[in-house]
Image: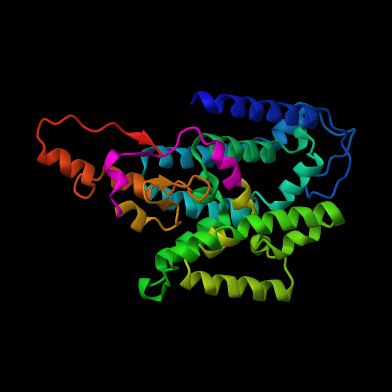
Amino acid sequence: MKHHLPLLLISAVLLTFAFAQAVHAQASKDGWNFADEDQAVASWTEDLKDQALDLAMFAGFATFALVGFFKKSERLKWITMGAAVVYLGFARSQLITIVNIFALTQWNLPVFRHNMVWYLFAIFTVVTTVLWGRLYCGRICAFGSMTQLLDKIVPARLRLEVPRRIDQRAAYIKYGLLGATVLYYLVTKNLSIYRYVEPFLMFSLQASTGMWIGLGVLLVATVFVRNLYCRFLCPVGAFLGLLSNLTVFRIKRWSECNTCKICEKACEWGAIRGPKIVASECVRCDDCERLYMDKQKCPHWLIIKKKSGARPPVMSRS
């Protein structure tokens, strides 16, 4: 924990500075698709009142997601993902996007008083990633939630299991896309590149024919390769993967995990490699943690059962 403190302090300072910048920024029209920021408008109280319902709805959704996460409830996780698709996806069309990363590179942040929900959403994403890992990718992102729900209704016989060696190498593609896309933006200042690396436009129902065709191809491919976009192609997932290297509360492992392969075989994200859980690829789906607690399947508990009165092994962080 102590060796994370400097990184956490830096993150806290950056977030505080971001708030200060946003609160004191001039209300000028920008190209980031945030709310109109005309000056001479309402007071802070009126702005807060206008956004109160959206703030309350997102706070409720975020709380529900965290309850499901802490309870390690599979049922609550699926309900959360369904709500993410309907509420954050089709109703609000609100996702963390590469455009937000572009904004960070220019420190072109929206005015806080007119975009409180966006700040709440962004800070929730950053803080949960630093604390627990890619929680956003695992159950908050509307597109990721949709593909995971799709995977549940697709017959298992249609799925193709990517060989582990290819899976591990293909995971780096999203980091290449993140770097290339940000570099392209910095050189050209052309925002439109996001249309070609993210399928999120499907939620706003505003896309060209070519983009709809591309989305269709991607979804068909996802039928055969589960979580294809999230695992191999998503630049936002890559960004949060880099951030998740700061994760404080990592998944704990039993000493038996050094030789047991049950969780590694069950992991749908290729995040467990031997005794190690790769934080940048883990989306905190809870599958392995539920296995840890299963006294009928986890070798840790089976060994304790055989050794009556034996002292349980100490858990270690991955």
Q: Where is residue 14 in the image (x, y as percent from the top left)?
A: 70, 30
Q: Which residue is drawn at 70% across and 36% down?
A: 116
On the image, which quarter does residue 18 sit in? top right
Q: Where is residue 199 in the image (x, y as percent from the top left)?
A: 65, 63
Is residue 122 part of the magenta span, yes or no? no
Q: Position of residue 68 (x, y in %)?
A: 41, 42
Q: Position of residue 31 (x, y in %)?
A: 84, 50
Q: Can residue 43 be seen in this view?
A: yes
Give 90 or 262, whichever is nearer the viewer: 262
Q: Which residue is drawn at 70% across and 32% down?
A: 49
Give 152 or 161, whichever is nearer the viewer: 161
Q: Which residue is drawn at 36% across and 75% down?
A: 157
Residue 18 in the figure: left or right of residue 155? right
On the image, which quarter does residue 301 sit in? top left
Magenta range is: 240-261
Give 37 or 174, whichever is nearer the viewer: 174
Q: Residue at x 30, y 39 (%)?
A: 254
Residue 151 in the figure: left or right of residue 214? left
